[in-house]
């Protein structure tokens, strides 16, 4: 269908994103130094998605996406099941953190092709622009017209909400041609600075084949033959690590647990004031470790390290530079 009042609707969407930023900043700046009651911890809710247009075909979206009006509006949009959704605004912090992660992937193995801002098509009415993706390098190269089929997708968010980042899992782990090989989705959420200039940050790791340690195995006298790992839905985070210079807002932490289904023990790091924060390179609890076989599901090439490791202190420092 034709899109009407484009400039007006884009301006409204931008204003809503700015309002989300203002509200998020107020929440962070009003975070008390100590958590209060758990009853209050379930009250914070993130605002709903910002729909710019509805009932939009993939062909029309692509035409719209290439027009100057969208570029001048200074917002990022994606097509989700026929709806054009505004989710983020350009920022120096995302523009610095995402390329740094791409460089780290590139330096880890020259057997990966690392791409930035890749358009990923899901079905016939959804298209996303992923911040960073990587796929195994093919020898010989694929035929002309080949579209990348990433094994890892990384998103870096400032304005985008935790709900929005979590909602991407269903499509990023779909069986569509471009995402059928995706084994890992990593989301980095960067919150505004607080009055003391600290900032909370959250790294959320999702796996297509999501398995977590079985808590029953830690009980005294566990039953015989109890499996050490249990399967979870891949829309539930495998692990989330709070790695900022401030702990998570306690209401946000409760909301995240309640709305993603993550187990309490899988939300780790600087969650509460008495937790050990991420203060230097190499801290064991602040590493994201991704096995090489997930990035090379067809077989790990000779010479590739066993794991791709992201030191979250480095991510934190990069984020703070422009936050």
Image (cartoon, rainbow, N blue to C red):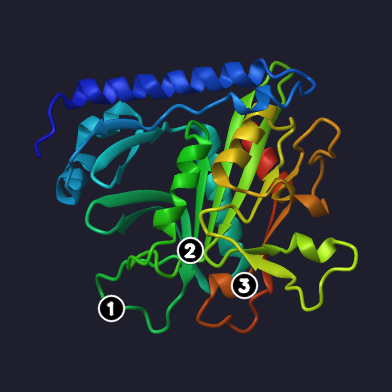
Mark 3 crowdedness (10 Å alpha carbons): few <14, some 14-19, many ≥20: some
Question: Is the C terminus in the top left, top right, bottom left or bottom right quadrant?
Answer: top right
* Sequence-wise first label, 2 or 3: 2
Mark on residue 292?
Answer: 3
The residue located at (46%, 65%) in the rendering is 182
Circle 2 SS class: strand
Left or right: residue 17 compared with residue 249:
left
Left or right: residue 185 compared with residue 140:
right
Does residue 256 sit above or below 14 in this rendering?
Answer: below
Per the image, the residue denoted by label 1 is 143
Which residue reaches farthest right?
Answer: 220
Left or right: residue 181 compared with residue 268:
left
Which residue reaches farthest left?
Answer: 2
Circle 3 SS class: helix
Query: 134 and 180: which one is in front?
Result: 180
Query: 238 and 316: which one is in front?
Result: 238
The residue located at (75%, 71%) in the rendering is 228
The residue located at (52%, 77%) in the rendering is 297
Left or right: residue 225 compared with residue 70:
right
Mark on residue 134?
Answer: 2
- From the top left corner, tell me how far across and down residue 54 is, in percent: 21, 36
Q: CA distance from mark 1 to mark 2?
A: 18 Å
Mark 2 crowdedness (10 Å alpha carbons): few <14, some 14-19, many ≥20: many
* Sequence-wise first label, 1 or 2: 2
Toward which corner of the image does residue 30 lie, by quadrant? top right
């Amino acid at each position: 269908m034709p899109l009407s009042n484009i400039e007006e609707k884009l301006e409204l969407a931008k204003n809503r994103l700015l309002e989300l930023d203002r509200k998020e900043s107020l929440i962070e700046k009003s975070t008390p130094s100590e958590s209060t009651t758990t009853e209050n911890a379930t009250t914070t809710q993130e605002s709903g998605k910002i729909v710019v247009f509805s009932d939009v075909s993939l062909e029309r979206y692509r035409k719209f996406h290439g027009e100057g009006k969208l570029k001048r509006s200074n917002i990022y949009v994606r097509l989700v099941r026929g709806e054009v959704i505004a989710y983020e605004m350009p920022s120096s912090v995302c523009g610095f953190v995402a390329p740094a992660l791409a460089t780290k992937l590139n330096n880890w193995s020259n057997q990966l092709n690392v791409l930035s801002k890749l358009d990923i098509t899901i079905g016939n009415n959804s298209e996303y622009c992923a911040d960073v993706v990587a796929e195994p390098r093919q020898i010989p190269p694929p035929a002309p017209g080949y579209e990348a089929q990433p094994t890892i997708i990384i998103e870096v968010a400032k304005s985008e909400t935790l709900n929005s980042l979590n909602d991407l899992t269903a499509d990023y782990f779909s069986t569509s041609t471009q995402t059928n090989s995706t084994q890992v989705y990593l989301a980095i959420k960067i919150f505004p600075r607080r009055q003391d200039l600290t900032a909370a940050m959250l790294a959320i790791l999702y796996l297509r084949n999501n398995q977590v340690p079985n808590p029953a195995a830690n009980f005294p006298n566990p039953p015989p033959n109890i499996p050490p790992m249990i399967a979870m839905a891949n829309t539930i985070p495998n692990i989330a690590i709070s790695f900022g210079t401030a702990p998570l807002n306690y209401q946000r932490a409760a909301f995240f647990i309640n709305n993603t289904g993550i187990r309490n023990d899988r939300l780790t790091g600087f969650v509460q004031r008495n937790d050990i924060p991420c203060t230097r390179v190499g801290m064991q609890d602040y590493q994201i470790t991704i096995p090489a076989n997930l990035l090379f599901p067809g077989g790990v090439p000779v010479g590739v390290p066993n794991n791709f490791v992201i030191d979250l202190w480095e991510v934190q420092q990069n984020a703070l530079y422009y936050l």
